[in-house]
Image: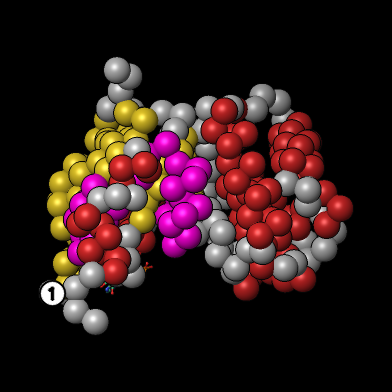
Amino acid sequence: MSEPVLRVENLRKSFGGLVAVDGASFEIEEGSIVGLIGPNGAGKSTTFNLITGFYEADGGTVEFRGEDIVDNSPEERAQRGMVRTFQITRELTGMKVAQNMRLGGQDHDGEKVVHALAGTAADREREIGSKAKTVLKQLELWELRDEYAGNLSGGQRKLLELGRALMANPDVLLLDEPMAGVNPSLTDEIIEMIDELCEQGITFLIVEHDVDMIMDISDKVIGMHQGQVLVSGPPSWVQKDEDLLEAYFGGEV
Ligand SMILES: Nc1ncnc2c1ncn2[C@@H]1O[C@H](COP(=O)(O)OP(=O)(O)OP(=O)(O)O)[C@@H](O)[C@H]1O
């Protein structure tokens, strides 16, 4: 069997006395779509932030292509091809769609993009512009390129977030609730896009509250509760896992 692209082992993180991630371990195979689910407060976002290096782990390892990167900064991880989506924050809503995309090609993963391209700064600018055009067309945002990001609908913003992340040439793309606030027609578009990108070799880790959708699109689903991985495997049996069902629906009312 091939090596997993990402392996998390015994990951731990507390905030004060609160244990948010409590010895989580799982693997992500290259070229797969993996969903990370669990009830509110299960530790999904914290795990996400530990993988991308936005939080420092209290313990455990994060291996990327067989190498422990737990001491690497988010920028170093991004340069290796691990990229996450960022919300289009207030600062970015004042910029046009096309500018947002160019920034995506330059910011956290800028080094990788720049190194990948030969030639002068002007050549690189042209290259970034041409990649932005391709991605915007893929995401059907090309017509909106001169629109301010702040004028986009919630769903269109989600597509722009995805587009910005794609500008950084990711190998592994971590999506934080890509469907939140997205209307059903755009949801389908995003799912199609994820499928296509996966076929092109991008590995996905997706944190998402829409469990049905995650079960539909994922090759593997990881279910978390109280900072621990309860279950990890194919959607067909994760959705029948008694412990996970109990975590979602059981316990005290
Ligand atoms: N920066 C922080 N400071 C203090 N406590 C935090 C912080 N981030 C998360 N927590 C706590 O850690 C626990 C896990 O939170 P986390 O956001 O990882 O869960 P989640 O599964 O993503 O939840 P949700 O589905 O509601 O987004 C929660 O009890 C939360 O209150």
Q: Is residue 72 left or right of residue 161?
A: left
Q: Secondary structure at mark 1?
A: loop
Most foreground residue, 108 or 141:
141
Which residue lies at the image location 25% right of the left edge and 51% below the top edge? 241
Residue in front for this viewpoint, 177 or 118: 177
Q: Position of residue 197 (x, y in %)?
A: 59, 34
Q: Quadrant of ligand 1?
A: bottom left
Q: Count every numbered label the image shows and give the total.
A: 1
Q: Which residue is mark 1?
A: 17
State the extent of the magenta-drawn residues as a range.
206-231
From where the camera sits, is residue 137 visible? Answer: yes
Q: Is residue 124 above or below residue 101?
A: above
| Left or right: residue 207 compared with residue 16 | right
Task: Examine the image and state in which quarter residue 185 appears.
Answer: bottom right
Instruction: Name the foreground residue: 88 vs 204.
Output: 204
> Is 208 covered by the magenta stretch?
yes
- Residue at 72% x, 68% y is 153
User: Quadrant of residue 72 in the image?
Assistant: top left
**Residue 51: in sight, yes or no?**
no
Q: Where's residue 220, x and y in %?
A: 37, 39
**Position of residue 215 in the picture relative to residue 85 (left or right):** left
Q: Quadrant of residue 99?
A: bottom right
In which quadrant is the C terminus drawn? bottom left
Work out which residue is located at the far top of the displayed protein and give it.
1
Q: Within 10 angstroms of label 1, few (less than 14), some, or many (20 or more) residues?
A: few
